[in-house]
Structures are given as C-alpha cells and as structure tokens.
Amino acid sequence: MTLVRFQPAPFPQLLSEFLNPSLAQAQRSQPAVNVIQTPTGFRLEVAAPGLAKEDFQLKMEKNVLTISAHKEQAQLAEGARFQRREFSFTAFERAFRLPESVDTDRVDAGFKNGILMVTLLNKPETKPEVKTIPID
C-alpha cells in the first residue's frame, strides 16, 4: 500500500476562499513534507522553520493522521510598521490517510532543527497458525 495525502471535498474549500480570501491564502501556505518508506514503516519529515515543537498538534482518527500548527504573530512596537513583509507565521493543517499496514498505536514524533519527524511503524506480521489435526 502507499501513503496517500487526504483530500477533503473541494466545495467547503471553494466556499471558504470566496467568503474569506485571506484565510484561504494562509491555508495554501503549507510546509513541505517528505514521506519516506522504511523497512519497518514510514517516516514523515515536515519542514517547519521558525516553529517550535509546542506549536504543533498531531491527531490520529480512523487511520488519518492530522498534523497542524499555529503560531501567534509577534506584535510590532507602537508606531512601527512594515515597509516590506515577505514572510509570516500562520496556521496550517495537513492530513494523511494511512495504509492499513500502519499500527496507529505505535506513532512517535520528534522535532529538531526546524524539522518535525513522525515515525509510523507497521503492524507486526501475523503468521497463520498451522495446527495438526489427529485422525481417530
């Protein structure tokens, strides 16, 4: 199986963009994610420079892993204003539908140098038990 990015229905997104275009723009600025398949499962690497581990929230529901983050904007000093603003920290949310082979109870996450790493381990393989049936 492959790891597939969860795509919610487009209608709520279109409605959101129409009613609040600035919010829609903020939702489009999502961090890049590497998905690496390992012999024991998967590893997600989320590039999130400028964020701290306290800014993240991970949720698992029905084989869908949701990674979200929110960072409050620092307020400018009174009388100060931006002459040019090329970046800002906003909230984001990404959802990943996990294959059935992933053990959703064995998920580990760590954060180092602006990279959130999420390790997803496969379920242990169960071999069918072979029984010998005696003949009477």
Image: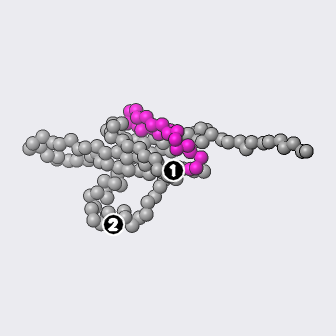
Q: Quadrant of residue 20?
A: bottom left
Residue toward you, 124 or 54: 124
Which residue is labeled 2 in the image?
15
- Report crowding for label 1: few under 14, some 14 to 19, many 20 or more residues within 10 A (C-alpha): some
Q: Residue at x 48, y 42 (%)?
A: 44
Q: Quadrant of residue 38?
A: top right
Residue 108: % across, % down: 48, 37
Give the x, y percent position of residue 4: 52, 53
User: Any magenta on residue 114?
Assistant: yes
Image coordinates for residue 81, horizontal then vertical, percent: 14, 46
Residue at the extreme front:
136
- Of the residues shown, which amino acid type is indicated by label 2? Leu
Residue matched to label 1: 63
Q: Which residues are magenta?
A: 99-120
Q: Amino acid at mark 1?
A: Asn
Residue at the farthest top position = 112
Badge 1 marks a residue whose secondary structure is loop
